Amino acid sequence: MAPTKRTLLAVPITASDTASARRQIKSAHTARADILEFRLDHMADADWPTLLAEASLPVIVTLRPRDQGGKFTGSEDQRLDLLADIAKARPAFIDFEWPHFAASSRARELISSITCDSLDADKPALILSLHDFHCVPSNLNESIAQMSSAPAAILKVVCMAQSIHDNLPLLDFAQQSSRPTIIIAMGQAGQISRVLAAKLGTFLSFSCLSLDQASAPGQIPLDEMRSLYRWERITPQTSLFGVVGSPIVHSLSPAIHNAAFEQTDFPGLYLPFLVEPGYENFARFMDGFLSRPWLDLRGLSVTIPHKENALRYLRDNSAHVDSLAERIGSVNTIVSSLETPLSGYNTDLDGALDALTLGMGITRPDLSGRKVAVLGAGGAARAIVAGLTQAGAQVLIYNRTASRAQRLAEEFTATTVPLAQLAKTTARIIINATSIGMSPNTQASPFPRDALKPDMTVFDTVYNPQQTLLLTQAAQAAATTISGADMFIRQAAKQFELWTGQPAPLTTMQQVLYRALA
Ligand code: NAP
C-alpha cells in the first residue's frame, strides 16, 4: 500500500456550458469536495481556462476520447495539442489513458514533457489510467505491470464489476502498489471499492453531488460517503463489517451499524455486500475476503438468501457454530477476528423474543405455558418457534404450505393448525412471521380483522413498513402491538455486541431505523 495522506474525495464536473459548470463547482465546494475533475470532453461549450483559473480546489483535467468511454470526437493529434495548451494553465493533474500512451511515441513524448511523474511538482502530475467498461479482464495484472513501467505519478485502474468478487483484483492492486493509486470497480457490485479506497489509502475516490449527476455507474453521493460511511473516520486500521445478501441495496443495516460505530467511537466500517444467490457465490465471497487479512473482516450480518449458506460454510470450514444457530438451521451473524475463531450465531431468536417480552412487559420464563399462534414456517418462523418452544410456550403453527408447517412442528414439538381455522384461534399471542403486509404489498394482512381482540398481543415481524396494516387493525381492536422494527433493532444490537464486546447504543440504533422507516 503506497504511503499517502487521507484519501481525497473527488467530484467530476461534467456540465457542457460555463454557467452550469460554475454551479457544479460551487456545489462541490459547498459539499466539501477535496478535488475536482474537469471532464473537458463533456465541457465542450464551457470556458474552461476561466473555470480553471477560478477553481480554488486542485483540478484533474481529463479529455477522454470515445474509445475510452469519453466524448472527445477530434483526432488524437488535436487532443494532444489541446492537452499541451491546457497544461500551460497548470492544472494539478492530467489524466491520460495508458493504451494511448503505450501506442504512440508522440503521445509518450508530449505527455511526458507536459506532466510530471511525482506529486507536488511545478508541472501537472500525470495520472495514467486503464479502463474496461465491461468487466475485469483476465489479463488485468499483465496490463497493470506494463502500465507500472511508465513514468506516472498515479496509476488508475477502472473496471466494470459484474459481481462482488471483481472488487478483489483492484483491491489487491491498491494494497500492493508502491505508487499512489486510484481504483474503481464500477456498477453496484463494485460500490464497496469506492469506500474501501479510504481503508487502502488510495489517492482519491470519485463521488458525485447527487445520483442524477453521477458520471459513472455506482458513484456514491458525497453526503452519503460522509454521513453513512463516515468517510473521514476510515483509516487503514479500520475494521471491516457488512451485510451479505441479495438484493441488498435497500438494507437499513449499514445506516444502523455505522451510526452505532460512530456513537461508541468504534473503529469500524459497515458495508453492503451484494453476493448473488447460491452457496458457491457465498463461499467464494467468504474465502476471498477472509484470505486477505489486510481487509480485517471482523463481522458479517447475513440475510436472504444466504442464512443457510452461512451455516453450511461454517460447518464446511470446521468453524464454531452456536448451538442455537445449529438448532434453528441458519446463521445470521458471523464473527471473525484474530483473537476469536470464525463463529456463527443466530440473533433473530433473541431479537424476536426480546421484542416480544419487552413489548408485553414480561420475562422469557413467563412465556411458559402460554399459547402462541405463529403465522408462517419460513426462516423467521423457525427462529421464533425455536425460541418460544425453548421458553416452554405452546406453539400453534399456521402456514399456507401445510407440509412445511408440519416439518417445523415436528422438529420443535409444536402443533400445526389449518390456516382456515386461524379466525378461531385460542392463542392470545399472535406472531406474523410471513412476508404478508411487507412493502410494497402494504394493503395485505395475514390475520382476519374481526378475529382481533383487546386481550391479544400482536407482533408483526415485518418492519417495512413499521406500522403494517395488521398492527393498525390490532391497535384499532385495542390489542397490544409490537413492531418488527423492535425485533430488527434487537437482533442488530446483539450482532454489535458479538462483534465489539461492548453494549450496543440501542437508542441511537432505534433513532436511525425509525428515521429511515418514517
Ligand atoms: P421465508 O423463509 O421466505 O418465509 C416466508 C413465509 O411467508 C413462509 O411461511 C410463506 O409460506 C409465507 N408467505 C409468503 N407469502 C405468503 C402469502 N402470500 N400467503 C401466505 N403465506 C405467505 O421468509 P422469512 O425469512 O421467514 O421472512 C418472513 C418475514 O419475516 C418477512 O416479512 C421478513 O421481513 C420478516 N423478518 C423480520 C425480521 C426482523 O428483524 N424484524 C428478521 C427476519 C425476517 P409458504 O411456506 O407457504 O411459502
Image (cartoon, grey):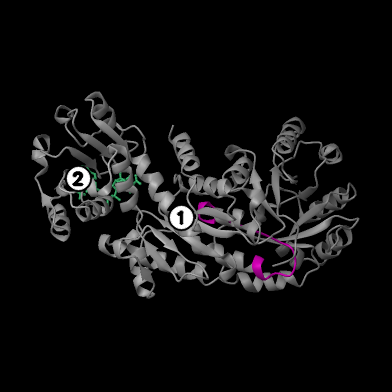
Q: Is 393 placed left or right of 244 in the picture?
A: left
Q: Is residue 334 left or right of residue 406?
A: right
What segment carries the magenta color?
Answer: 174-190
Taking depth in this image into account, of 509 and 306 the one nearest to the observer is 509
Please name the amino acid that badge 2 sits on. Val
Q: CA distance from mark 1 to mark 2?
A: 28 Å
Is 358 situated left or right of 516 in this image?
Answer: left
Label 1 close to label 2 by CB (< 8 Å): no
Task: Name which quarter of the figure residue 477 lies in.
Answer: top left
Whether the residue under disc 2 has CB within 8 Å of ligand 1: no
Mark 1 sits on what residue?
Answer: 497
Is residue 410 magenta-colored?
no
Q: Residue at x 48, y 60 (%)?
A: 299
Compared with 7, 38 (above or below) is above
The answer to whether residue 180 is magenta is yes
Q: Name the amino acid type tagged 1.
A: Glu
Q: According to the image, label 2 marks what residue?
A: 374
Residue 186: tell me if it is visible: no
Residue 264 position in % (x across, y down): 56, 49
